[in-house]
Image: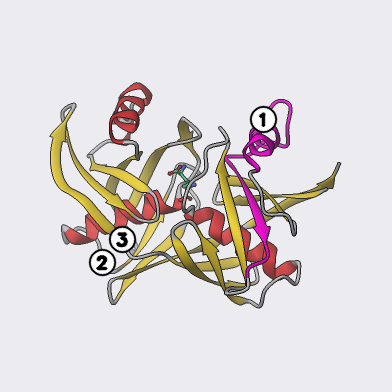
C-alpha cells in the first residue's frame, strides 16, 4: 500500500485511498505511531462515493474515529487533487456531512459545517468556557496568557465534556487583532501543533464577543498563519498544506 504523509500547519496525517470501505482503526494506531510507524496525529482514508467526489474515513492517532478534522480536510483535498481523484474545487463526504474544499497550489480553503453552540458560557476550574461543535466538539476559553494552558486541566475537561480543549489569546498585530490558539486534541490526548476545528471554535467565540473581525489571522502552536472568515454564518478556513513524503510497504 502507498501512504502519503501531510502536514497542515503542523497537524499531520497519513493519507491513502482504496476501494475498500472498512474499519481502519487498527491501521491508524500503527501508522500514526511516532516511534514504530510513519507518525501522525491522524489517518485519512479516501473511498469512492456515488454522491460526492469521494468519502473520507478519519481516525485520530489512538484509533478513535472523529466526524470532522479541519486541517485534515485541507490535506485530504490537496491529496485528492494531486492524485487526480477530484477537481480543484471538490465536495466530499465526512462524518459531519458534505465538505467543500478548494485547492490553489499549496493553499487550501475549506468551508466548515455549520457551527452548533452547545453551551454558551459556563465557569469551571477557574476559567470561563464556551462549548461549540465546529464539526467536532470544542471547549474554548479566552485567556490573557497562553502559558495558562495546562495538560492535566485539559485532560480533565476533555473527558468530562468529551471535547477538544482550546486556550485562545487575542493579540495586536500590524493586521489588527489576531488570535493565538493552543489545543489539547481528543484522540491524540495531548497538545497538537494545530487544530483546524479548534481554531474555528476560538475564532467564532472571539468574533461573537466582538473581539476579532469577520476575517482574522489565527496562529496555532506551530506559528503558521491561517485565515478564518465568517461569511453569512459560514466559517471558511484557509492555509497552506505540505506533502512531506510518499512511501509504500
Ligand atoms: N481530534 C479531533 C478530530 C481532529 C480535529 C483536528 N485535527 C482539526 O484539525 O480539526 C476529535 O477527535 O474531535
- Mark nearest the camera among 1 and 3 is 3
In percent of width and height, residue 184 lies at 41, 35
Q: Secondary structure beneath disc 3?
A: loop
Q: Which residues are magenta?
A: 24-49
Mark nearer the N terminus (2 vs 3) = 3
| Residue on which disc 2 sits | 213
| Residue on which disc 3 sits | 115
Q: Residue furthest top?
A: 152
Residue 90's label in the rendered image is none
| Residue on which disc 1 sits | 34
Q: Secondary structure beneath disc 2?
A: loop
Mark nearer the N terminus (1 vs 2) = 1
Report the front residue among 220 and 82: 82
Report the front residue among 182 and 232: 232
Q: Are marks 1 and 3 in contact (CB under 8 Å)?
A: no
In percent of width and height, residue 105 lies at 65, 71
**What distance separates the C-alpha of mark 1 from that of mark 2?**
38 Å
Q: Are marks 1 and 2 in contact (CB under 8 Å)?
A: no
- Mark nearest the camera among 1 and 2 is 1
Report the front residue among 194 and 156: 156
Whether disc 2's CB lies below 8 Å from ligand 1 is answered no
Q: Quadrant of residue 233?
A: bottom left
Mark nearer the N terminus (1 vs 3) = 1
**What distance separates the C-alpha of mark 1 from that of mark 3?**
32 Å
Q: Secondary structure beneath disc 1?
A: loop
Is 195 situated left or right of 92 in this image? Answer: left
Q: Are marks 2 and 3 in contact (CB under 8 Å)?
A: no
Report the front residue among 203 and 165: 165
- Mark nearest the camera among 2 and 3 is 3
Examine the structure image and report whether residue 104 is included in the region drawn in magenta: no
- Name the residue rendered at 57%, 74% in the picture: 51
- Name the residue rendered at 64%, 38% in the picture: 28
Amino acid at each position: 500500500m502507498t501512504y502519503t504523509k501531510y502536514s497542515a500547519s503542523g497537524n499531520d496525517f497519513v493519507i491513502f485511498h482504496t476501494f475498500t470501505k472498512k474499519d481502519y482503526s487498527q491501521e491508524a494506531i500503527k501508522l500514526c505511531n511516532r516511534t514504530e510507524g510513519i507518525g501522525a496525529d491522524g489517518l485519512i482514508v479516501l473511498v469512492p462515493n456515488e454522491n460526492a467526489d469521494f468519502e473520507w474515513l478519519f481516525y485520530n492517532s489512538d484509533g478513535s474515529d472523529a466526524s470532522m478534522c479541519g486541517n485534515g480536510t485541507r490535506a485530504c483535498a490537496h491529496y485528492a487533487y494531486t492524485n487526480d481523484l477530484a477537481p480543484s474545487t471538490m465536495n466530499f463526504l465526512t462524518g459531519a456531512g458534505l465538505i467543500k474544499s478548494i485547492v490553489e497550489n499549496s493553499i487550501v480553503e475549506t468551508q466548515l459545517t455549520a457551527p452548533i453552540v452547545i453551551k454558551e458560557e459556563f465557569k469551571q476550574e477557574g476559567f470561563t468556557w464556551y462549548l461549540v461543535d465546529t464539526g467536532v466538539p470544542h471547549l474554548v476559553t479566552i485567556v490573557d496568557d497562553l502559558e495558562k494552558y495546562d495538560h492535566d486541566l485539559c485532560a480533565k475537561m476533555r473527558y468530562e465534556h468529551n471535547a477538544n480543549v482550546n486556550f485562545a489569546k487575542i493579540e495586536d498585530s500590524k493586521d489588527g487583532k489576531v488570535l493565538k490558539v493552543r489545543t489539547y486534541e481528543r484522540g491524540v490526548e495531548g497538545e497538537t501543533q494545530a487544530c483546524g476545528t479548534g481554531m474555528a471554535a476560538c475564532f467564532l467565540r472571539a468574533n461573537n464577543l466582538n473581539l476579532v473581525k469577520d476575517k482574522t489571522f489565527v496562529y496555532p502552536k506551530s506559528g503558521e498563519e491561517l485565515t478564518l472568515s465568517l461569511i453569512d454564518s459560514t466559517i471558511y478556513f484557509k492555509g497552506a498544506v505540505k506533502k512531506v513524503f510518499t512511501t509504500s510497504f
